[in-house]
């Protein structure tokens, strides 16, 4: 590096003495290029980025391509998923490379943002986000769970967030300009992605201070954009003004009439009703019927938990049927011996029984039978508090007869860890002999 700098200094002096000499001009250009290449290469080694595809750009004297490649490094995605790790500081490295080569680093960043922030195609992938997934969590693509954003779009959004992590005030202005734009070329999903970046980079108090905007208003605006994008996916065009001012009951009825045979339409109606407190019993009964018809079990669980706060719907036949279907669902395809994952699925679903406001109206006897058929008798103990005293005692005795003391104690301990512990009188005061056959010990409090 010292030699390159010395060579450049000599070339500059030579050029000052002979300003019109073409040979001097060429020598200065070569000296400057050599110095910049060596400094750029030094930065790559300093930040542990001296890899063949990056060094190739240095050899070709193409710093712009080098910076682009660095921002496409897979470790940027990895650090968003696994926080603990020894990751290179690519942002600082690119800034130094831009300085060395006399480039505008900010201009390059916004060039990349203009490339990555819009979606990679014309589909409204992010429109599948549900309001229950509204909390911004970019480590797991909530929309993707619903068949939402493709992998490329998710990765590009993570890269945008990384590019903007310097927290510059101009970044807020850039993102807000897109989010609030009335330009028809900026679609709804593009606006949503800019708001996701905004909330991911800045704390609410900091965002309010920098932008002067109320963060609650921005969140509500983002919710509206989510609904609008989902309607656009269903070919139901609506702008932000008409959505905010329309009668939501009429809107829901219209969407239900035209879109109740699609998963997107069913979930959109559910989320609109939840968000705008529409608790029409007939509509929710129809919603449950359609969710069951299409076997959307994950969404059925979310829906039933939502309805646990609405007593006027608890007496509906569909509400009771939906709970029975949900609780029996993991047992439908079980053949013993079951795997640990299958047992966990059964345990998690049965644990929901404690949230059911009409638990006494469920087919509990059938659930108990399914637990024994699947050779998971200990799971039947979750249901004991809701059985009659006589039936509960029979279940406990049956469990005692099917499992050894050691096995029962082990399985009950797992239930306690899952927060599903209930008193089990027949097991609580048992004495268990130690494995060595020595001193008797009392079991831990069981279900």
Image (cartoon, helix red, strand yellow):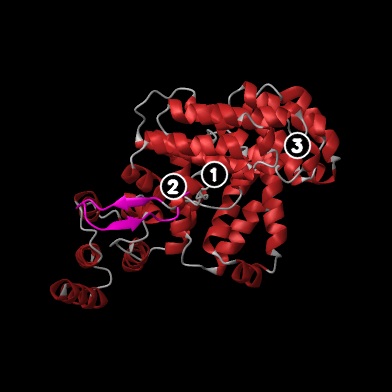
Question: Label 2's element?
Answer: helix
Question: Label 1's element?
Answer: loop
- Residue with the mark numbered 1: 118
- Circle number at residue 186: none
Please tell me in which quadrant of the rendered image residue 315 appears. top right
Q: Is residue 52 magenta?
A: no
Please tell me in which quadrant of the rendered image residue 6 appears. bottom left
Instruction: Where is residue 291? Give x, y as percent.
Output: 65, 27
Does residue 383 sit above or below 441 in this rendering? above
Q: How many marks?
A: 3
Q: CA distance from mark 3 to mark 1?
A: 44 Å
Relative horizontal placement of residue 444, taking residue 210 as reference (left or right): left
Q: CA distance from mark 1 to mark 2?
A: 61 Å
- Residue with the mark numbered 3: 314
Q: Would residue 22 be seen by someone viewing this image from the given angle? A: yes
Question: Label 3's element?
Answer: loop
Relative horizontal placement of residue 17, taking residue 159 as reference (left or right): left
Q: Is residue 441 magenta?
A: yes
Does residue 306 sit above or below 19 in this rendering? above
Which segment is the magenta one?
A: 430-447
In front of the other: 387 or 33: 387
Instruction: Where is residue 207? Give x, y as percent.
Output: 61, 67
Instruction: Where is residue 228? Give x, y as percent.
Output: 70, 40
In front of the other: 350 or 160: 350
- Circle number at residue 427: 2
Please tell me in which quadrant of the rendered image residue 255 appears. top right
């Amino acid at each position: 590096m010292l030699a390159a700098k010395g060579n450049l200094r000599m070339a500059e002096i030579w050029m000052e003495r002979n300003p019109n000499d073409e040979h001097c001009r060429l020598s200065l250009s070569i000296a400057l290029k050599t110095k910049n290449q060596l400094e750029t290469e030094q930065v790559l080694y300093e930040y542990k980025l001296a890899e063949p595809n990056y060094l190739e750009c240095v050899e070709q004297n193409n710093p712009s391509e080098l910076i682009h490649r660095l921002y496409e490094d897979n470790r940027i995605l990895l650090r968003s998923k696994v926080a603990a790790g020894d990751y290179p500081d690519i942002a600082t490295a690119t800034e130094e490379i831009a300085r060395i080569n006399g480039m505008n680093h900010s201009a390059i960043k916004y060039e990349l943002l203009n490339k990555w922030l819009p979606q990679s195609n014309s589909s409204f992938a992010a429109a599948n986000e549900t309001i229950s997934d509204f909390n911004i969590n970019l480590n797991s693509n909530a929309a993707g769970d619903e068949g939402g954003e493709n992998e490329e779009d998710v990765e590009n959004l993570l890269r945008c967030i990384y590019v903007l992590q310097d927290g510059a005030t101009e970044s807020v202005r850039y993102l807000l300009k897109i989010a609030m734009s009335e330009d028809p070329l900026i679609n709804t999903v593009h606006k949503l992605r800019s708001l996701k970046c905004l909330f991911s980079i800045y704390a609410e108090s900091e965002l309010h201070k920098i932008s002067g905007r109320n963060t609650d208003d921005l969140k509500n605006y983002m919710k509206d954009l989510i609904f609008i994008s989902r309607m656009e996916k269903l070919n139901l065009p609506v702008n932000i003004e008409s959505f905010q001012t329309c009668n939501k009951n009429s809107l829901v009825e219209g969407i239900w009439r035209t879109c109740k045979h699609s998963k997107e339409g069913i979930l959109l109606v559910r989320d609109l009703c939840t968000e705008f407190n529409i608790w029409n019993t007939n509509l929710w009964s129809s919603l449950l019927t359609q969710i069951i018809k299409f076997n959307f079990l994950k969404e059925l669980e979310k829906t039933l938990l939502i309805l646990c706060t609405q007593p006027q719907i608890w007496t509906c036949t569909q509400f009771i049927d939906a709970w029975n279907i949900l609780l029996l669902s993991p047992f439908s395809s079980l053949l013993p011996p079951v795997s640990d994952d299958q047992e966990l699925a059964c345990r998690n679903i049965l644990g929901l029984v404690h949230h059911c406001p009409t638990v006494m109206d469920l087919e509990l006897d059938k659930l108990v039978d399914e637990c024994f058929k699947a050779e998971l008798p200990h799971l039947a103990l979750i249901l004991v508090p809701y059985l009659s005293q006589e039936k509960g005692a029979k279940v406990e005795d049956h469990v005692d007869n099917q499992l050894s003391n050691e096995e029962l104690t082990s399985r009950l301990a797992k239930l306690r860890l899952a927060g599903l512990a209930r008193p089990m009188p027949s097991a609580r005061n048992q004495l268990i002999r130690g494995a060595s056959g020595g001193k008797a010990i009392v079991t831990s409090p069981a279900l």
